Amino acid sequence: MPRLRQVHATDAHELAQTLYGMLFGERDPVDEPGTATGSPGDWWTVTALVPDLFDHIVGGFGFYRSGNRLLDPQLRELGQTRTGWARGSQFVYSQHVKACREVGLPEEKIQAIRAWAVADVFSATERAVLAYTDALVLQGGRVPDEVFDALRVELSEEEILELTYIVCTYEMHATMSKALRLEFDDVDDPIIEVPGPEGVGPSTMDAMRVVEDLDAG
């Protein structure tokens, strides 16, 4: 379940009600969740808690899908999908794998996004986009000159700015989804203590103490 309260259709503001109708039809998405892509849809029902925040998110979707964009949709989706993978968001990754198909990316490239650095299916432009995406997401914007120079060879400055904004927006979406346990990111943290078996001899700490004693001697 999401960590924050969800907004029922009857309590949602005008734009949220419109979007609810597009995604869920006549259903109240809190009582009867589920979208056409298989996600619960609680990204929308939770963000509707703050109407102008919701409107800002919808505006962001409108921005990257606008016909005014110069950036090739396939390059955009490469960046968005890699962002989901790199940030560890099952929701962003899964949704944009589907979007990759919608914009015509071949399946071999979609499946290679996870390990793009050792794949031989990407063009120089695509590799530059993926390297830049990793620098934005995994290195917090610490982009080597060599990566930016490779990107500049392939894309205009306007396209680079669009890509930067879209990738950074989706890194935020991925982080929000994980923090609030929304959609496919409603999962327990896998990093926990694993109990050791009882009665099977000395522990690792015991063994380390023996090594320290030997070193001291």
Image: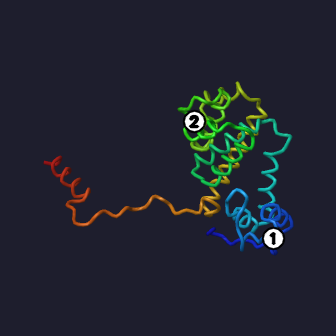
The crowding category of the residue bearing disc 2, from other C-alpha atoms within 10 Å (few below 14, some 14 to 19, many at least 20), is: some
User: At 58% from the left edge and 38% from the top edge, which residue is drawn?
Assistant: 112
Residue 72: x percent and y percent?
76, 35
Task: Tell me the residue that label 1 is attached to.
Answer: 12
Front residue of 136 and 192: 192
Residue 203 left/right relative to 10: left
Q: In the drawing, does residue 177 fall left or right of residue 119? A: right
Q: Earlier in the sequence, mark 1 or mark 2?
A: 1
The image quarter containing residue 58 is bottom right
Query: Amino acid type of disc 1?
Result: Ala
Residue 204 versus residue 66 in the image, above or below? below
Spot occupied by residue 100 in the image (x, y as percentages of width and height): 70, 43
Q: Which one is in front, 147 or 142?
A: 147
Q: Which residue is at 81% across, 47% downward? A: 63
Q: Is residue 16 left or right of residue 34?
A: right
Q: Name the outermost residue toward the left.
A: 217
| Circle on res. 45 | none
- Residue at the extreme top of the image, as rendered: 153
Q: What's the CA distance linking mark 1 and mark 2?
A: 41 Å
Residue 135: x and y in percent read 60, 38
Please tell me whether mark 2 sits on a helix, a strand or a loop: helix
Q: Residue at x 64, y 39 (%)?
A: 107
Mark nearest the camera among 1 and 2 is 2
The kind of residue tagged 2 is Trp
The residue indicated by pointer 2 is 116
| Looking at the image, residue 89 lies above or below residue 20 | above
Secondary structure, mark 1, is loop
Looking at the rendered structure, the number of numbered marks drawn on it comes to 2
Q: Quadrant of residue 173?
A: bottom right
* Colour option used: rainbow
